[in-house]
Amino acid sequence: MKSLSKSFPMLREFAELVPIIDCHDHTLKPGPRFLDPIHALVEGYFATDLWSVSSDNDIQYVLNSKIPWRERWPLFKELWDLAKNTGYGQVIKSVLREFYNIDELTFEGMEEIEKKMPNLEDPAVFDSILEKANITLRICDIFNDGSSLDVITVPGTENTLALPPRGRMVISLPHFHSICSYDDIQTRMAPLNRVCTKTLDDYVTGCYEIFQQFKELGAVAFKDQTPYNKSISFSNPTRAEAEKVFNWIVSDPRRKASYPDQLKPLDDYLFHRFLDMAADMDLPVQLHTGLLAGIRHDVSKANAILLRPVLELHRDVKFDLFHGNWPYSGEWLFLGKNYPNVYLNFCWVNTIDPIYSQRLFQQAVSSLPHGKIFGYGSDYVGYATHAWAHSQLAKDNIAIALSDLVDMEYLSMKEAKDIIKAWLYDNPNRVFKLGLPDLHFSQEG
C-alpha cells in the first residue's frame, strides 16, 4: 500500500532500513513443505476469509490437498474473487508478486507457482526469507505450532532445545494452569522425573522449577492464549478454593474436573501464581486479546478490558497485550495509557485489518507514550513467505499513519523516524531484554 502524503516515501524507505524484531510467531522449525499451489498460498488466516464467504463443506474441499489442486481450482478461484481484498488477501497478493511474479491469480499462474514453490524446510531458504524481511529476531511460542493447541513438549535435563531460525522462545502457560485430571498433572510434571500426587503446593513448586529451566534455556517471556478456551475474566480465588478442586482430582486418578465451571477456581488460582512467578523471574507476560483464529468464536470473552483487575493486582508484571484487541481499539489504548505495566503489541492485527491498524497507530501516538508499542509480529506459523509479506504490510501501515501526522505537523520527520525505530526494534529489545545492539542512524538516514 502507498500514501499520497509527501512524507510517505521517506518514511517508508526508512522503515525498510530498520531491523525488525518479530514480537510474536509460532514457528517450531523451518517449514512447512508446500503440498500444492493452494496450500502454498492460503492455508491459515486467508482460509478463514474463504470460509467466511462459503461453507464448512466448501472450505474443507478447497483445502483438501489429497484432491488434485486442478480439481479444486474452480471453487477456489470463485471464493478468491469474493475475498481477495481483505487484509489477509493483501498478504497473499504480496506473496504472489514477490515470490512468483504474478499480478492476477489465473490457472496458468497456479501452474507457475507449482514449479516455483520454495522449499521452506531448507533452513537456508527459510532464513534467507527472514533476511529479506530484515527480521533480526523472532519471539516464538514454539510449543504451539498450530497443529495441536494443547500439546507442549518440555525440555529434558540435558538443557538443550532446538530453536527455529532467529528464534527466542516463550513459556506457554495454558497447558500448566488448565489441568483437569490426575494424568494432566503427571504429564506436566514429567520433566522433573517425579510423581506429583500429594498437594497443590507440590504442583506449584514443580511448575516453578520447570519455568526456571525454560528461562535457563533462553526463554524471554511467558505467553498465554486463554480465550481460546475460556474468558480472560479471571477471578481471584483463595488457595483453599483451588486446593479443594486439586484434592478432588488427585484423590481418584479416574476423575476429571468439568471444564470450565468446576475447574475455574484451580485454573484461575494457578494463573495468578504463574504471574507471581513472572514477577520473580523478571519475565514479561504476553496475553492474547481480541480476535481468535478460525471462525465462530465469541470475541467478547477475549476483550482486553476484562484483564483490568489482573493488571491492577499484578503491578510488578510487564504485560504485552496482543493483536490490537481487534475490534476493541479504545479499550486497548486505555489500558496502555492507564497502566505503567502494560505494553501494546500490533502482532497479527496489521493483516487482520490494515486500515484499523493505520488509524490505531495514529491514535497510539496521540494517546500514549510511543515507548509502549511493539509494531510487528508475524504470527504466520512457519510460513516465512507470508511473514515477509506481513512485514511489508506492517511497514506500509506505520509509514502511512506517521506520514499523515508529519504532514499535519503533529510530528517532525525526525520524531516519526524515531518512532519507527522504537516500534520495530528499540521497544521490544528493551522490554524483553533481548540484548541486541543499539541502532544508530545518521540524521539523513
Image (spheres, helix red, strand yellow):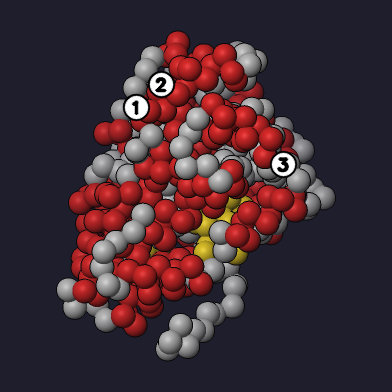
Amino acid type at circle 3 is Asn
**Does 392 sit left or right of 250 as displayed?**
left
- Closer to the camera in the image, 182 or 397: 397
Which residue is found at the position 41% from the left and 38% from the top? Answer: 89
Amino acid on which the number 1 mark rests in the picture? Leu
Q: Please tell me how crowded label 3 is: few (under 14), some (14-19), or many (20+) other residues with Cα within 10 Å.
A: some
Q: Secondary structure at mark 2?
A: helix
* Residue under label 1: 82
What amino acid is found at the position of numbered circle 2 in the picture? Answer: Glu
Q: Are marks 1 and 2 in contact (CB under 8 Å)?
A: yes
Q: Alpha-carbon distance for marks 3 and 1?
A: 30 Å
The number of numbered discs placed on residues in the rendered structure image is 3
- Which residue appears at 31% of the width and 53% of the height? 357
The answer to whether 367 appears left or right of 30 in the picture is left
Q: CA distance from mark 3 to mark 2?
A: 28 Å
Residue 256 coordinates in the image, percent (x, y): 53, 17
Discs 3, 2 touching: Cβ within 8 Å? no
Cα–Cα span, label 1 and label 2: 7 Å
The residue that label 2 is drawn on is 78
Secondary structure of the residue carrying tag 1 is helix
Compare residues 394 and 12 and report the one nearer the observer: 12
